[in-house]
Image: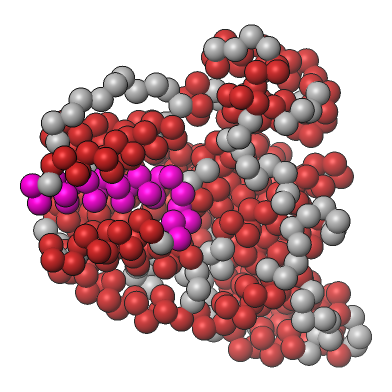
């Protein structure tokens, strides 16, 4: 590849900064397009640049190029760094990008948060927009939607203003994912269709994969299992534009969920078994969770209970949303085993989690299953994401953290009057009358807004 050859030449002439910049471009291009053919060349060139092995620039390149059996080595070196503002914002962004591309979203979010805080202060809007979009997707993976929604909204605005169409498409799909999970299917489809027009001609596999995922998850939520199955199959086909090594494992558990009502359990069980050796090669917590989730849903009756418990007791990096989905499936299984009284506890817990997230369609499914188990449910209360717009929520979170209107405005590039207007509309929606009450209502909903 010309970029790799140019990087090797720069290294030979004693310019490691240029060499790393060129290698980063080559590795990023290969990663986002899901091409592995340059792997050996990239690693060989990286070894000869002559920088420290824990240099964030080098680690981001290695993460982009890493094969499954190399992930553990790279992530161990990334995790040595502290995620705080004592280091420069670009280093924090590079480390966050490395963790993000390897599927370690909790670590990624911490690094990206440190980069976001500093980039806001420095007015580095191009990089800030990218960090916001990546953090939005990390928070979606972690089930922390009240952080993801404001990030996706601001990321979409800033990527548009800084002319970054692929990143803007990624932000729009994040917004669409959240809208689909909250029951606004039409708005979700409009956003993914808009993103699709950008990423398909560009061959943007990573973003197109989440386009397919968003459509599949929305179809799952509404019980359109054939549609969901078709969309998810594409994500697992290496020849399809929807396949990407960072995102394909999201299809596993979701395909299992679609397979059960369609009677395609044996077919998907074989797919999961084929993926197990690959999962064993990588420590990716999202991949491991997807395999456990799939095993539980596809199990025979004599093994299902142990597998459900293992999945629920495992590292549920998907947070409350993934736990609630497992709880519904477990509750349904218990009821079908004529253990009706036992089924109610996981179904109640799932209903409450979906309610808190504002996952309207999923909440109704849990309520239906509870009714089938002989228990009625109280009326659902709207969640924060239904009561507030994404920007109102972001402003309220910052105010709850103790920032003044002027400080919030400086960070979000808004006038302090606009900030005041957002808060004025927010108070009655939350049933409060004063700024001092914000923390008790939403102050704990954004755990990653300050770097750890």
At 66% across and 62% down in the image, what residue appears?
Answer: 97
Question: How many numbered marks have been drawn onto this rendered protein structure?
Answer: 0
At 55% across and 12% down in the image, what residue appears?
Answer: 431
Q: Is residue 251 at all visible to an observer of this figure?
A: no
Location of residue 12 by image quarter? bottom right
At 89% across and 80% down in the image, what residue appears?
Answer: 15
Vertical side of 370 occupied by 248: above or below: below
Looking at this rendering, what residue extends furthest in the right direction? 14
Q: Nearer the viewer, residue 140 or 310?
A: 310
Location of residue 345 by image quarter? top left
Vertical side of 362 occupied by 9: above or below: below
In the rendered image, residue 115, in percent from the top left (x then y), is placed at 76, 52
Query: Which residues are drawn in magenta?
Result: 315-338
Vertical side of 288 occupied by 169: above or below: above
What is the quadrant of the N terminus in the image? bottom right
Q: Is residue 432 at all visible to an observer of this figure?
A: yes
Q: Nearer the viewer, residue 251 or 86?
A: 86
In the rendered image, residue 186, in percent from the top left (x then y), is placed at 37, 32
- Main SS of the magenta part reads helix
Q: Is residue 10 magenta?
A: no
In the rendered image, residue 400, in percent from the top left (x then y), is placed at 69, 27
Q: Nearer the viewer, residue 57 or 313?
A: 313
In the rendered image, residue 340, in percent from the top left (x then y), is placed at 13, 42
- The image's colour scheme reads secondary structure
At 77% across and 28% down in the image, what residue appears?
Answer: 402
Looking at this rendering, what residue extends furthest in the left direction? 338
């Amino acid at each position: 590849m010309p970029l790799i050859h140019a990087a090797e030449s720069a290294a030979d002439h004693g310019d490691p900064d240029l060499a790393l910049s060129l290698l980063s471009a080559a590795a990023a291009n290969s990663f986002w397009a899901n091409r592995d053919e340059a792997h050996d060349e990239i690693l060989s060139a990286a070894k000869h640049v002559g920088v420290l092995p824990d240099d964030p620039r080098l680690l981001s390149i290695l993460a982009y190029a890493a094969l499954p059996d190399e992930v553990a080595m790279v992530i161990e070196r990334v995790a040595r760094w502290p995620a705080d503002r004592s280091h420069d914002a670009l280093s924090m962004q590079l480390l966050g990008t490395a963790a993000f591309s390897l599927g370690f979203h909790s670590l990624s979010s911490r690094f990206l948060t440190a980069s976001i805080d500093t980039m806001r202060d420095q007015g580095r809007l191009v990089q800030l927009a990218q960090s916001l979009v990546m953090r939005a997707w990390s928070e979606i993976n972690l089930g922390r939607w009240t952080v993801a929604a404001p990030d996706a909204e601001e990321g979409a605005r800033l990527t548009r203003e800084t002319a970054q169409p692929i990143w803007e498409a990624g932000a729009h799909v994040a917004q669409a994912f959240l809208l689909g999970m909250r029951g606004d299917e039409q708005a979700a489809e409009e956003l993914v269709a808009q993103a699709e027009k950008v990423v398909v001609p560009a061959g943007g596999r990573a973003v197109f994969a989440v386009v397919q995922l968003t459509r599949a998850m929305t179809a799952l939520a509404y019980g359109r299992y054939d549609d969901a199955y078709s969309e998810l199959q594409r994500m697992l086909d290496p020849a399809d534009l929807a396949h990407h090594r960072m995102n394909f494992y999201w299809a596993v558990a979701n395909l299992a969920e679609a397979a059960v009502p369609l009677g395609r359990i044996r077919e998907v069980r074989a797919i999961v078994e084929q993926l197990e050796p690959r999962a064993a090669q990588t420590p990716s917590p999202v991949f491991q969770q997807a395999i456990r989730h799939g095993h539980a849903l596809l199990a025979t009756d004599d093994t299902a209970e142990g597998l459900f418990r293992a999945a629920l007791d495992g590292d549920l990096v998907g947070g409350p949303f993934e736990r609630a989905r497992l709880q519904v499936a477990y509750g349904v299984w218990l009821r079908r085993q004529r253990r009706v009284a036992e089924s109610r506890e996981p179904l109640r817990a799932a209903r409450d989690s979906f309610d808190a997230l504002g996952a309207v369609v999923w909440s109704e499914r849990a309520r239906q299953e509870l009714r089938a188990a002989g228990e009625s449910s109280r009326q659902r209360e709207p969640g924060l994401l239904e009561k507030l717009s994404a920007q109102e929520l972001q402003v309220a979170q910052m105010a709850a953290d103790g920032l003044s209107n002027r400080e919030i405005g400086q960070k979000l590039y808004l006038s302090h009057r606009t900030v005041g207007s957002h808060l004025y509309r927010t108070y009655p929606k939350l049933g409060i009358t004063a700024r001092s009450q914000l923390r008790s209502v939403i102050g704990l909903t954004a755990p990653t807004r300050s770097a750890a």
